[in-house]
Image (spheres, rainbow, N blue to C red):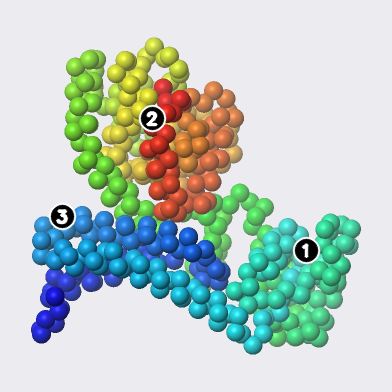
Amino acid sequence: MWVTGTGVSEPYQALVIIVALLAFILFRRSDISELHSKPKIWNIAISTLVAWSLLFTILLILGYATKTSSIFSRRLILSWAVVTPLFILSFRIVIDRLVAHISRLRARPRRVVIAGAGDNARMLATRIKDNPYLGLSLDGHFDDRSLQRLGDLSSEQLLGKLTELAEYVRSRRIDLIYIALPMRNIQRVTELLNGLHDTTASIYYVPDVFVFDLIQCRTDDIDGLPVIALCETPFYGTRALVKRASDFIIALLVLISISPLLVLIALVIKLTTPGNILFKQRRYGLDGREIIVYKFRTMSVSEDSDTIKQATRNDDRITPVGSFLRRLSLDELPQFINVLQGTMSVVGPRPHAVAHNEEYRHLIKGYMVRHKVNPGITGLAQVRGFRGETETVGDMRRRVESDLEYLRNWSLELDLKIIFKTVKMMLKDEKAY
């Protein structure tokens, strides 16, 4: 054992500190709203195992880089690596169930009414009803429109006009009021607030931000002044650290494992075709800044001008070796060097040539938003089959829509799913040419 009469040895003390710091970063919940809902056990298990695998991989790399791995007992480390994730998973499940149980034991749920009955208000009502762990009980809506205009809202759900809201709150001892009126009715919101000043209910305003095309919508503040992010990168705070750490680890492991293959491909290109081994092309990277992307050269030309012709099926510019490399996507392998440099990610929107960016940014709404993150070697659009030649604007639009969906829904689990699907597609992708 490493616990002796003099206490824990210094190497293990350092290990505990490093693990604690990594665990704080990797196991921290990225969405506070999860604390108020009941996550599925499968989701808890996946997120726990992914975070633990990443943590343990980082430790292995640190041990190898510092040549300190031999200091620690292999049997102890292996046992710890197997038992700890099971303990963490069990602990998280117990805590989630305990929070849910405490929520149900409240003396009474807090009573809620919603000012407004539009799409935003109904979305809020659905989430309150579907989530008993919030400890809220919805009485109904107040709106100036009639039931006929409101569509499928029942008479029991519509409690009255907005002018009747204050009296209802006072007489029924309502705890919470959510004002979910459109932004254009800000004067009506002000009038409601004035009428509710003599009640003891808590009041929240639900901004109708869903009229916008939201990318990573979240709330923040600047020295106490509340602000709402409508279009933001998903990689901020600890998320940025997790993304960069996973990119670096995956790229390093891949480059080490495929280094003989890289040397073999380089020799074949050099011996069979004149010209450079690597093809360097300007692309747009993070925030639209130009970067240099590396690929194995697969064509007899190296185009990087203001007008670039996309590769097509049976393109006579593609060399015989290049055709083989492109079919298996092996020409993309040098981009793992870009990942180590920090100019690309393993997963993200594929970088397009500068000439193509300048063409499509004026044709497709939200095209440049895809540059809120580093471009990727593979991406959600690619595993959905939206890769290769874009013959029409519609082809590119579908690709961009998938890129924006990736930005809205990023998670480490999503990255890993895309990577696994990419590996499966490499051997049977008909659009790789």
Work out whether mark 2 precedes mark 1 in sequence or the reverse, and give the earlier one: 1
Q: Which quadrant of the structure image shows residue 200?
A: bottom right
Q: Which residue is mark 2?
A: 427
Task: Please indicate whether residue 161 sits to the left or right of residue 77 in the image.
Answer: right
Q: Which mark is residue 64?
A: 3
Which residue is depicted at the point 32% across and 28% down? 331
Q: At label 1, which amino acid type do we have?
A: Ala
Which residue is depicted at the point 14% across and 75% down? 2
Residue in front for this viewpoint, 416 or 172: 416
Which residue is depicted at the point 57% across and 25% down? 392
Label 3 vs label 2, nearer the camera: 2
For the question of whether residue 362 can be seen, the reply is no
Q: Which mark is residue 117?
A: 1
Mark 2: which secondary structure?
loop
Estimate the x, y position of residue 105 in percent, counting from the top left.
60, 84
Does the residue at mark 3 contact the one at mark 2 (Cβ under 8 Å)?
no
Q: At label 3, which amino acid type do we have?
A: Tyr
Q: Which mark is residue 392?
A: none
In the rendered view, tell whether residue 431 sits above or below residue 66.
Answer: above
Q: At label 2, which amino acid type do we have?
A: Leu
Mark 3: which secondary structure?
helix
Label 2 vs label 1, nearer the camera: 2
In the rendered view, tell whether residue 224 sits above or below residue 299.
Answer: below
Give how far apart the Cα atoms at labels 2 and 1 are.
52 Å
Estimate the x, y position of residue 427 in percent, counting from the top left.
38, 30
